[in-house]
Amino acid sequence: MGRVIRLEDLEVLVCCGAGGVGKTTTAAALGVHAAAHGRRVVVLTVDPARRLTQALGLPGLGHEPRPVSGVGGAGGGSLDASVLDMRQTFDDVVRAHAPEGTAHRVLDNPVYQTLSTSFAGTQEYMAMERLGQLRDEAAATGRWDLIIVDTPPSRTALDFLDAPRRLGAFLDGRLARTLARPARMGGSVLEATLGRLVGRGLLADVRAFVSATDTVFVGFRDRAEATAGRLRQPGTAFLVVATPERDALREASYFVQRLHEDALPLGGVVVNRVVLGTGELSAGRAEAAAEQVSDPVVAALLRVHADRADTARRQQRLVRAFRSGRPGLASVQVAERPDVVDLPGLAGLAEDVLAPG
């Protein structure tokens, strides 16, 4: 089936998939591999586990990319890593797009302070925005030639791509336009009702927020649309990560279909944490042998083998069903492994991901 991606051909790699499938670790591993082969890489992750930051040799990750030591070197490659800070990214965009004298009114508004961290879609939108910021910096400084993005986990769709539309719909909606109008003598029935429900103070904060952000969010939407457009250009690929479980593969199917519908470049699918190498001894024969032997340790080992062989058979059945309707889709199975705890472990994972499927 071929390799799922060729890192040497890419400028942007977007790793997507449901939560809990190893997407973040895969993104970091591919960054380590690319840097070791001479690329200048930055990995933007959403919520790295502590063991992953330890594997990268960093006590923690922040908004600004930090260099990962021990990667690259003689080949000229380098690896930087950062974590998505929603509030910092949101604040940066407000400062960049707000008219003079308006930014502080937006940043100090209680409604903005809630929206910037908890509004539905904020994390996904800010991941898109942060990607745009990193691309701009890469173009201006040449600091990176490959950006790898670990998108927020989604259980239903590519919210990463939908968030700008949802935010735009909210700000262009009837309620937002109504709240943005200055209050008239006596107020409207809608305003009076809202005032009783949520309180006059909150209603005033909402009105002030919507009015102050009118021009800011025009810049937000324009920038997000430009970033989305660049994701369709040559040099970009999406990599879908899943596990060999029914729900995860169902999510992967949705991602593949959605990327196709949106004409976004799909590199392939990584099926992670697969039980491989159980040998020729079937689960049934192992169970039967366990009943016959007198040594309890041997019997226990045979039953462990039987359980793994049964799991492997079930997983392969699911993977075959997933692949059957997509004969041209590049995919690779990556064997289950202990938690990655160091750079060699990440490099080994990347080799498995990049192996021919």
Image: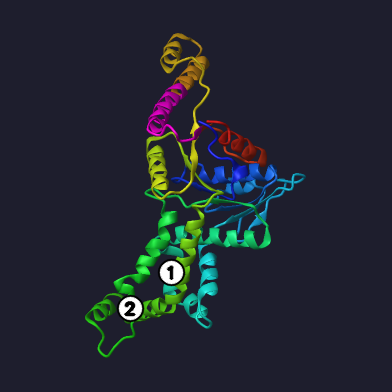
The residues bearing labels 2 and 1 have C-alpha atoms spaced at a distance of 17 Å
Residue nearest the observer in this picture, 209 or 261: 261
- Residue 343, placed above or below residue 218: above
Give the overall secondary structure of the magenta segment.
helix
Instruction: Pick out the residue farthest to the front.
Output: 234
Q: x%, y% of residue 95?
A: 54, 74
Numbered label attached to residue 98: none
Q: Residues within 10 Å of mark 2 (few under 14, many from 20)?
A: many
Q: Tell me which residue sits at (55%, 69%) in the image.
A: 92
Q: Which mark is residue 114?
A: 1
Check if residue 179 falls in the magenta segment.
Answer: no
Provide residue 299's location: percent of width, then percent of height. 48, 15
- Whether residue 316 appears in magenta in the rendering, the answer is yes
What amino acid is at disc 2? Leu
Q: How is the image coloured?
A: rainbow
Camera-side residue of 231 and 190: 231
Region in magenta: 308-332
Q: Nearer the viewer, residue 10 or 349?
A: 10
For disc 1, the neighbor class at 10 Å (few under 14, some 14 to 19, many from 20) is few
Does residue 351 lie above or below 292 as drawn? below
**Circle 2 sits on which residue?**
179
